[in-house]
Amino acid sequence: MKSTEIPTRERIVVAASKLFYSEGIRAVSVDAVAEQAGLTKRTLYYHFASKDDLVAAYLEARDQPNLKLFQRWFADAEGTLADKVRSIFHNLARSARHPRWKGCGFLRTAAELANMPGHPAVKLGIAHKKRVEAWLAASFEAEESTPPRCWRGRSSCCSTVRLPSSCSTAIPPTWKPQARPRQFWSRRRWRFPNSKPRPK
Protein backbone atom coordinates (compact mmCIF):
# COMPACT_ATOMS: atom_id res chain seq x y z
CA MET A 1 0.00 0.00 0.00
CA LYS A 2 1.37 3.39 -1.00
CA SER A 3 1.62 6.20 1.55
CA THR A 4 -1.07 8.14 -0.35
CA GLU A 5 -3.49 5.25 0.22
CA ILE A 6 -2.97 5.24 3.99
CA PRO A 7 -5.62 7.20 5.92
CA THR A 8 -4.39 10.70 6.70
CA ARG A 9 -4.68 10.33 10.45
CA GLU A 10 -2.68 7.11 10.38
CA ARG A 11 -0.01 8.74 8.23
CA ILE A 12 0.34 11.49 10.80
CA VAL A 13 0.65 9.02 13.69
CA VAL A 14 3.24 6.94 11.81
CA ALA A 15 5.29 10.04 11.02
CA ALA A 16 5.03 11.31 14.59
CA SER A 17 6.00 7.90 15.98
CA LYS A 18 9.22 7.81 13.95
CA LEU A 19 10.23 11.32 14.98
CA PHE A 20 9.13 11.17 18.62
CA TYR A 21 10.91 7.87 19.22
CA SER A 22 14.13 8.81 17.44
CA GLU A 23 14.46 12.43 18.58
CA GLY A 24 12.20 12.86 21.61
CA ILE A 25 8.89 14.57 22.28
CA ARG A 26 10.13 18.09 22.99
CA ALA A 27 12.70 18.12 20.20
CA VAL A 28 10.12 17.47 17.47
CA SER A 29 7.84 20.27 16.27
CA VAL A 30 4.43 19.97 14.68
CA ASP A 31 5.94 21.38 11.49
CA ALA A 32 8.47 18.53 11.42
CA VAL A 33 5.71 15.94 11.82
CA ALA A 34 3.66 17.53 9.03
CA GLU A 35 6.68 17.52 6.74
CA GLN A 36 7.46 13.89 7.56
CA ALA A 37 3.84 12.93 6.83
CA GLY A 38 3.87 14.87 3.55
CA LEU A 39 0.99 17.19 4.35
CA THR A 40 0.32 20.70 5.57
CA LYS A 41 0.31 21.85 9.15
CA ARG A 42 -3.31 22.89 8.69
CA THR A 43 -4.26 19.34 7.72
CA LEU A 44 -2.47 17.98 10.78
CA TYR A 45 -4.41 20.29 13.07
CA TYR A 46 -7.62 19.18 11.39
CA HIS A 47 -7.02 15.68 12.78
CA PHE A 48 -5.29 16.64 16.05
CA ALA A 49 -6.31 19.67 18.08
CA SER A 50 -2.87 20.01 19.69
CA LYS A 51 0.58 18.48 19.91
CA ASP A 52 -0.45 16.95 23.25
CA ASP A 53 -3.18 14.98 21.45
CA LEU A 54 -0.64 13.83 18.89
CA VAL A 55 1.76 12.64 21.58
CA ALA A 56 -1.08 10.72 23.22
CA ALA A 57 -1.98 9.10 19.88
CA TYR A 58 1.67 8.10 19.45
CA LEU A 59 1.64 6.14 22.72
CA GLU A 60 -1.83 4.77 22.16
CA ALA A 61 -0.60 3.24 18.91
CA ARG A 62 2.18 1.44 20.80
CA ASP A 63 -0.03 -0.02 23.52
CA GLN A 64 -1.65 -3.13 22.01
CA PRO A 65 1.24 -4.11 19.69
CA ASN A 66 3.62 -4.10 22.66
CA LEU A 67 1.26 -6.08 24.86
CA LYS A 68 0.66 -8.66 22.14
CA LEU A 69 4.40 -9.01 21.67
CA PHE A 70 4.88 -9.80 25.39
CA GLN A 71 2.03 -12.30 25.20
CA ARG A 72 3.61 -14.02 22.21
CA TRP A 73 6.99 -14.24 23.93
CA PHE A 74 5.29 -15.66 27.01
CA ALA A 75 3.19 -18.20 25.08
CA ASP A 76 6.05 -19.39 22.85
CA ALA A 77 8.39 -20.07 25.77
CA GLU A 78 8.68 -23.62 27.01
CA GLY A 79 9.10 -24.73 30.59
CA THR A 80 7.74 -23.49 33.88
CA LEU A 81 5.96 -20.24 34.62
CA ALA A 82 9.27 -18.75 35.74
CA ASP A 83 10.80 -19.75 32.39
CA LYS A 84 7.98 -18.02 30.53
CA VAL A 85 8.41 -14.81 32.52
CA ARG A 86 12.17 -14.98 32.06
CA SER A 87 11.61 -15.30 28.32
CA ILE A 88 10.03 -11.83 28.23
CA PHE A 89 13.14 -10.27 29.70
CA HIS A 90 15.48 -12.30 27.52
CA ASN A 91 13.65 -11.09 24.42
CA LEU A 92 13.70 -7.52 25.70
CA ALA A 93 17.45 -7.78 26.25
CA ARG A 94 17.89 -9.09 22.71
CA SER A 95 15.77 -6.24 21.32
CA ALA A 96 17.82 -3.72 23.27
CA ARG A 97 20.93 -4.75 21.35
CA HIS A 98 19.41 -3.57 18.07
CA PRO A 99 21.15 -0.45 16.71
CA ARG A 100 17.84 1.41 16.41
CA TRP A 101 16.78 0.63 19.97
CA LYS A 102 16.35 3.81 22.00
CA GLY A 103 14.58 2.48 25.05
CA CYS A 104 10.95 2.31 26.05
CA GLY A 105 8.76 4.86 24.32
CA PHE A 106 6.47 5.03 27.35
CA LEU A 107 9.34 5.57 29.78
CA ARG A 108 11.05 8.17 27.64
CA THR A 109 7.82 10.12 27.18
CA ALA A 110 7.08 9.97 30.92
CA ALA A 111 10.58 11.27 31.64
CA GLU A 112 10.16 14.21 29.27
CA LEU A 113 6.77 15.04 30.78
CA ALA A 114 7.76 14.41 34.41
CA ASN A 115 6.58 17.88 35.43
CA MET A 116 3.20 17.33 33.76
CA PRO A 117 1.56 14.40 35.61
CA GLY A 118 -1.85 15.23 34.18
CA HIS A 119 -0.70 15.07 30.57
CA PRO A 120 -2.79 12.64 28.45
CA ALA A 121 0.37 10.78 27.39
CA VAL A 122 1.42 10.21 31.00
CA LYS A 123 -2.02 8.82 31.80
CA LEU A 124 -1.78 6.51 28.80
CA GLY A 125 1.58 5.28 30.04
CA ILE A 126 0.14 4.44 33.44
CA ALA A 127 -2.81 2.67 31.80
CA HIS A 128 -0.39 0.63 29.69
CA LYS A 129 1.47 -0.51 32.80
CA LYS A 130 -1.79 -1.54 34.43
CA ARG A 131 -2.77 -3.59 31.41
CA VAL A 132 0.57 -5.38 31.46
CA GLU A 133 0.16 -6.01 35.18
CA ALA A 134 -3.39 -7.31 34.75
CA TRP A 135 -2.31 -9.68 31.99
CA LEU A 136 0.57 -11.05 34.05
CA ALA A 137 -1.66 -11.51 37.09
CA ALA A 138 -4.21 -13.41 34.97
CA SER A 139 -1.43 -15.56 33.53
CA PHE A 140 -0.18 -16.41 37.02
CA GLU A 141 -3.67 -17.38 38.11
CA ALA A 142 -4.13 -19.52 35.01
CA GLU A 143 -0.92 -21.37 35.85
CA GLU A 144 -2.11 -21.78 39.44
CA SER A 145 0.91 -19.92 40.67
CA THR A 146 1.25 -17.10 43.15
CA PRO A 147 2.61 -13.94 41.54
CA PRO A 148 5.41 -11.99 43.17
CA ARG A 149 4.19 -9.63 45.88
CA CYS A 150 5.00 -6.50 43.93
CA TRP A 151 2.77 -7.69 41.08
CA ARG A 152 -0.31 -8.35 43.25
CA GLY A 153 -2.84 -5.57 43.56
CA ARG A 154 -0.38 -2.68 43.67
CA SER A 155 -0.94 0.10 41.19
CA SER A 156 2.30 1.65 42.46
CA CYS A 157 4.14 -1.00 40.45
CA CYS A 158 2.74 0.62 37.34
CA SER A 159 3.50 4.16 38.35
CA THR A 160 7.07 3.31 39.31
CA VAL A 161 7.54 1.44 36.04
CA ARG A 162 8.79 -1.84 37.46
CA LEU A 163 6.90 -3.99 35.00
CA PRO A 164 8.08 -4.62 31.46
CA SER A 165 6.88 -2.21 28.82
CA SER A 166 7.97 -1.63 25.31
CA CYS A 167 11.42 -2.51 25.95
CA SER A 168 11.49 -1.52 29.53
CA THR A 169 14.47 -1.96 31.80
CA ALA A 170 12.67 -4.08 34.37
CA ILE A 171 14.66 -6.82 36.09
CA PRO A 172 13.42 -10.43 36.31
CA PRO A 173 12.33 -11.54 39.81
CA THR A 174 14.96 -14.28 39.79
CA TRP A 175 17.82 -11.91 39.08
CA LYS A 176 20.35 -11.43 41.85
CA PRO A 177 23.28 -9.05 41.79
CA GLN A 178 26.64 -10.71 41.45
CA ALA A 179 28.53 -10.60 44.69
CA ARG A 180 31.61 -8.45 44.51
CA PRO A 181 34.85 -10.04 45.75
CA ARG A 182 35.81 -8.82 49.16
CA GLN A 183 38.78 -6.53 49.31
CA PHE A 184 41.19 -5.93 52.09
CA TRP A 185 44.05 -3.59 52.76
CA SER A 186 47.46 -5.19 52.60
CA ARG A 187 50.87 -3.63 52.22
CA ARG A 188 49.28 -0.24 51.60
CA ARG A 189 47.39 -1.39 48.53
CA TRP A 190 44.15 -3.14 47.67
CA ARG A 191 44.40 -6.87 47.08
CA PHE A 192 41.82 -9.47 46.17
CA PRO A 193 41.64 -12.74 48.12
CA ASN A 194 43.90 -15.48 46.79
CA SER A 195 45.88 -13.00 44.72
CA LYS A 196 49.58 -13.71 44.39
CA PRO A 197 51.87 -11.44 46.42
CA ARG A 198 53.97 -8.95 44.52
CA PRO A 199 57.59 -10.15 44.12
CA LYS A 200 60.01 -8.52 46.54
Image (cartoon, rainbow, N blue to C red):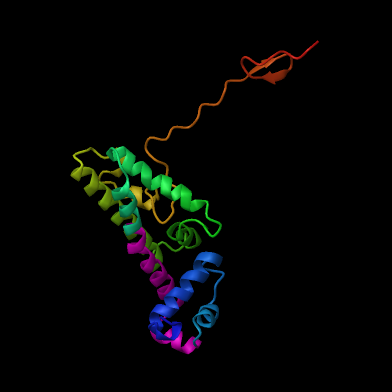
Residue 196 lies, in percent from the top left, at 69, 14
* 164 or 90: nearer the viewer: 90
Where is 175 relative to 184, above or below? Answer: below
Position of 177 compared to 84: left or right?
right
Prevailing secondary structure class for the magenta stretch in the rendered image = helix
**Residue found at x 50% / y 68%:** 20
**Residue found at x 52% / y 71%:** 19
Residue 140 in magenta? no
**Residue found at x 21% / y 42%:** 143
Residue 119 seen in the figure: no
* 64 or 157: nearer the viewer: 64
Residue 58 in magenta? yes
Residue extent of the magenta highlight: 40-67
The image quadrant where one finds the C terminus is top right
Position of 182 compared to 15: left or right?
right
Residue 41 lies, in percent from the top left, at 50, 86
Residue 62 lies, in percent from the top left, at 38, 65
